[in-house]
Amino acid sequence: MRIGDLAHATGVNRRLLRYYEEQGLLGPVRLSNGYREYGEADIATVRHIRALLAAGLSTAVIARVLHCLRKEDVLPAPARCPAFIEDLRRERAQIAERISELQTSQRALDSILDAAVRGN
């Protein structure tokens, strides 16, 4: 299937699909005319990429773990890829740390805002 077909099947625009290819997340076959040719498994791959992005993972992390995922539409990693779990735990810990930092910033801003409102 061509890039437009993949875009239609996944709801992801062509520009993003090209970006995923640049990041090494997708590897379409290049035809002699330069067109990209995608397989049916690429539909599931794009859906996995989107789910992992929605979970807060960067494309660099996704590139490290994407090979662990099955080509079907189910997201769990096979048992033969224990590094996948380690990568996800590490990313989750980093997200939790960022949330904590943002909450600290929010409390500081709340204090400043309260003081500013009381001062008026």
Image: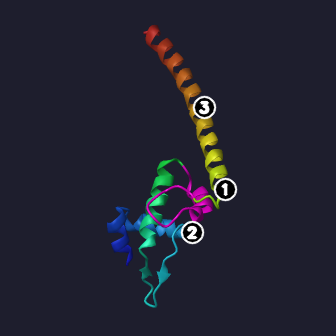
Callout 2: 10 Å neighbours few (<14), some, many (20+)?
some
Callout 3: 10 Å neighbours few (<14), some, many (20+)?
few
Q: Residue at x 39, y 74 (%)?
A: 3
Q: Which quadrant: the N terminus?
A: bottom left
Residue 6 position by quadrant: bottom left
Under mark 3, the amino acid is: Glu
Look at mark 2 in the image and give the residue it sits on.
24
| Residue 76 location (% of width, % of height) | 53, 55
Look at mark 3 in the image and give the residue it sits on.
101
Under mark 1, the amino acid is: Pro
Q: Residue at x 32, y 67 (%)?
A: 8
| Residue 37 location (% of width, % of height) | 43, 80
Q: Residue at x 48, y 14 (%)?
A: 114
Give the CA distance from mark 3 to mark 2.
31 Å
Q: Is residue 60 left or right of residue 26?
A: right
**N-terminal label among 3 and 2:** 2
Q: What's the magenta region?
A: 57-77
Under mark 2, the amino acid is: Gly
